Image (tube, grey):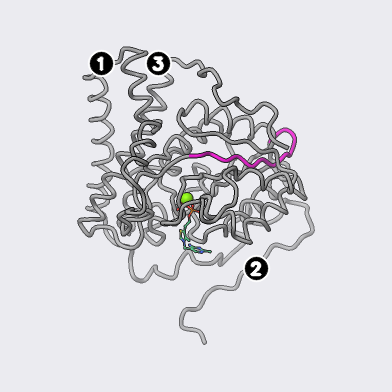
Amino acid sequence: MSDPEGARPHAPPIPRTKEELLRLYREMLRIRRFEELAARAYTQGKISGFLHLYIGQEAIAVATKEVMRPGDRVVTTYRDHGFALALGSDPKACMAELFGKKTGLVGGKGGSMHFFDRSVGLWGGYAIVGGHVPVAAGHAFASKYLGDGAVTFCFMGEGALPIGATHEGFLLAGLWKLPVVYVIENNQYAMGTPLSRTSPVDDLTVRGPVYRFVTDRLVVRDVFEVREHLARAARRAREQQQPCLLELVTYRFRGHSMSDPAKYRTKDEVARWKAQDPLHRHEEELRTTFGVSEEALEALDDEVVEEMQAAVDFADASPPPDPEERFEHLYVEDPSAHPDLGPPPGDDIPAVTVRSFDPKGA
Ligand SMILES: Cc1ncc(C[n+]2csc(CCOP(=O)(O)OP(=O)(O)O)c2C)c(N)n1
Ligand SMILES: [Mg+2]
């Protein structure tokens, strides 16, 4: 069933104030500037491994933070920096993670693809395409089981749709009516493969009704619209235990990762999407509708660049992880030290005991 309240193609603009627009614009800009500096650090050889940039998709992470309540969770892909920053992770710890430093978000052991920060509700970036979709169903099941009223937001690229694990996760969510919002960030490409080569239909939400999901679809041009659609889906998940599938049609302006020059698309195509880029549209709106001066916009940009440059300097100056800690944080050694990992008090399901990992063992 598609969302009966879904926006019409030319829905009137959502009212906003200058202050609110400035706040959200700044959040989007923080992500963009962070990643531009990360890209530069990568070319300087300061970041190794993969680096997948979120440039062009920032409005989605920022809008998500807007609709989250305490206890809500985000599970996403390897394109995860934007979510960490939008949700409130420290940019210094994020940059240090990219640099593989001890002060990083996960101690420098995860890198770009494995950001994780429970303190802000980020339950992981996942590198296996579609592999996190059942994980998100598990989070949502926990919420339903514990009755904590939380919603899990699970983000995936359109490239996750042909993957089996995605549909196994969807099935559980639909069958058990789990409080989860599945969001397809359709950025047009899976690595270099355009959607037209992997999907017979443009509208990816057609896969939702077979799982009894409410579906909705939006072209991402305006952060307020994204917020409205996410809020509606979150409300349904939270109040009615109604899983939702929301397709957000967007674009990534960089290659898949830093090793991809993105030669598979035309300049015209990129220019068309640039005209829709929420960051640029909102900057223009601040200038023309709200009369924000060029100087004020530049000052804001300078402040954001300064914050992110400080993150680079911090990462640069930080030490690498200690070699003797390399096998720590791989498995839970003592489940009793993590009561939140076990069943609620009084429940007779035994806590899972995980054997410790002996790297030298046979
Ligand atoms: C199961 C699996 N198969 C293949 C890959 C290699 N791979 C990494 S990213 C990617 C493309 C995913 O594209 P999409 O889901 O559209 O996300 P985007 O990168 O566009 O955000 C592929 C095939 C993988 N990581 N996992
Ligand atoms: Mg994609």
Residue at image position (24%, 58%) is: 46
Q: Position of residue 106 (x, y in %)?
A: 42, 56
Mark sitting earlier along the chain (3/2): 3
Q: Work out whether residue 93 can be spotted.
A: no
Q: Is 247 left or right of 30, judged from the image as shown? A: right
Q: Nearer the viewer, mark 3 or mark 2?
A: 3
Residue located 44% across and 15% down the image:
17
Q: Can you say whether 10 is above or below 204 in the image?
A: above
Residue 293 is labelled as: 1
Q: Give the number of the mark in front: 2 or 1.
A: 1
| Nearest the eye: 117 or 85 | 85
Stretch in magenta? 238-249
Which of 281/328 is in front?
281
Q: Amino acid at mark 1?
A: Ser
Q: Is residue 346 magenta?
A: no
Residue lying farthest bottom?
Answer: 362
Q: Is residue 224 left or right of residue 95?
A: right
What amino acid is labelled 3 in the image? Lys
Q: Which residue is mark 2?
A: 353
Give how far apart the Cα atoms at labels 3 and 2 are. 53 Å
The residue carrying mark 3 has its beta carbon less than 8 Å from ligand 1: no
Q: Look at mark 3 in the image and give the residue it sits on.
A: 18
Residue 245 shown in magenta:
yes
Disc 1 residue crowd, few under 14, some 14–19, many 20+, Cα 10 Å: few
- Report x, y in % for residue 160: 55, 55
Q: Position of residue 146 (x, y in %)?
A: 72, 46
Find the distance from the CA under tag 2 to the CA under tag 1: 60 Å
Q: Is residue 131 visible?
A: yes
Residue 196, placed above or below residue 328: above
The numbered mark, 2 or 1, whose residue comes first in the sequence reads 1
